[in-house]
Image (cartoon, grey):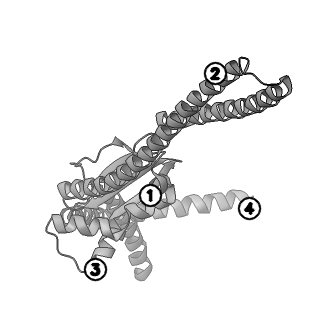
């Protein structure tokens, strides 16, 4: 019985609240419309922010420029953005330039050797120019290191080829001496000693030659597997701002206006009672 009475009271209270909201509908609707207008005004006054994005794959043979942590630090270094702002005739104090970089430049790791880099600006072309400049600086330094390391490997390969050629000549000479040894006039014991020495020397040279050939194959494989830095997605000038989010701002403002309208209606009713 008590449960039925409680249910009746709750139903009456709910009807009273709904009646109250209907009675003060003009206030609620008015504040709701004000909320929409406020969201629209915020969208109109807020300066649009554009973002340019790029994805790069690090070289696998550029020394420290192939290291993920070093690459992230280098890309976010103040030196790059300082040079670029000078080229674009943008004047910043060192402190403002540092804040400008920290607030707008973002570097994220996607994979072990892949980076996603973005830059924000109120001007879409400026965002693209600055990001392109940063990537160009890093790519040039990475490529320079890549070519230097590749040249070192090619020089080492040339040295190995020379050593192999020299050993091949020495082996031919050793074989010729062994063949001529049979025609020399000396005791069988002396011939045996000389022959054994030559055979040992020949065996050593053959082992060295095999080792050099294996080393040569490794160097060739390393050179063939060397990859330069790759720009997977080049920076683009976006025409759609990432801020303000106009629709979201209006929805939030409208909901806020609705909640405030309902609260004000209940609060005024409370004061009147």
**Residue 183 quadrant:** top right
Above or below: residue 251 compared with residue 89 = above
**Percent x, y for residue 240?**
24, 49
First reached walking from the N terminus: tag 2 or tag 1 = 1
Above or below: residue 123 compared with residue 148 = below
Asked which secondary structure carries label 1, the reply is: helix
* Residue identified by numbered label 3: 94
Point 28% across, 74% down: residue:
97
**Percent x, y for residue 171?**
63, 27
Residues under numbered marks 1 and 4 in contact, where contact means CB atoms less than 8 Å apart: no
Asked which secondary structure carries label 3, the reply is: helix
* Residue identified by numbered label 4: 2
Q: CA distance from mark 1 to mark 3?
A: 22 Å
Pointer 2 local density, CA inside 10 Å: few below 14, some 14–19, many at least 20: few
Q: CA distance from mark 4 to mark 2?
A: 121 Å
Tell me if I can see residue 208 in this picture.
yes
First reached walking from the N terminus: tag 3 or tag 2 = 3
* Residue identified by numbered label 2: 176
């Amino acid at each position: 019985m008590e449960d039925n009475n409680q249910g009746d009271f709750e139903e009456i209270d709910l009807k009273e609240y709904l009646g109250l909201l209907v009675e003060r509908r003009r206030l609620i609707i008015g504040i709701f419309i004000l909320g929409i207008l406020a969201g629209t005004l915020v969208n109109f006054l807020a300066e649009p922010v554009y973002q340019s994005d790029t994805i790069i794959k690090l070289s696998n043979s550029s020394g420290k420029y192939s290291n993920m942590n070093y690459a992230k630090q280098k890309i976010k270094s103040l030196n790059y953005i300082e040079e670029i702002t000078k080229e674009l005739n943008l004047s910043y104090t060192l402190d403002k330039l540092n804040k400008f970089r920290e607030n707008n430049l973002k570097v994220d790791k996607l994979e072990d050797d892949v980076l996603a880099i973005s830059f924000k600006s109120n001007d879409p072309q400026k965002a693209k120019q600055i990001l392109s400049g940063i990537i160009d600086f890093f790519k040039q330094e990475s490529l320079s290191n890549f070519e230097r390391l590749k040249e070192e490997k090619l020089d080492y390969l040339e040295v190995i080829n020379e050593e192999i050629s020299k050993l091949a000549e020495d082996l031919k000479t050793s074989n010729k001496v062994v063949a001529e040894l049979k025609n020399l006039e000396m005791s069988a014991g002396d011939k045996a000693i000389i022959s054994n020495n030559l055979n040992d020397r020949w065996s050593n040279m053959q082992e060295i030659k095999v080792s050099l050939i294996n080393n040569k194959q490794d160097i060739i494989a390393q050179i063939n597997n060397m990859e330069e830095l790759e720009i997977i997605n080049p920076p683009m000038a976006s025409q759609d701002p990432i801020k303000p989010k106009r629709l979201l701002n209006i929805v939030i403002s409208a909901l806020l206006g609705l909640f405030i309208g309902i609260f004000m209606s209940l609060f005024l009713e409370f004061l009147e009672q």
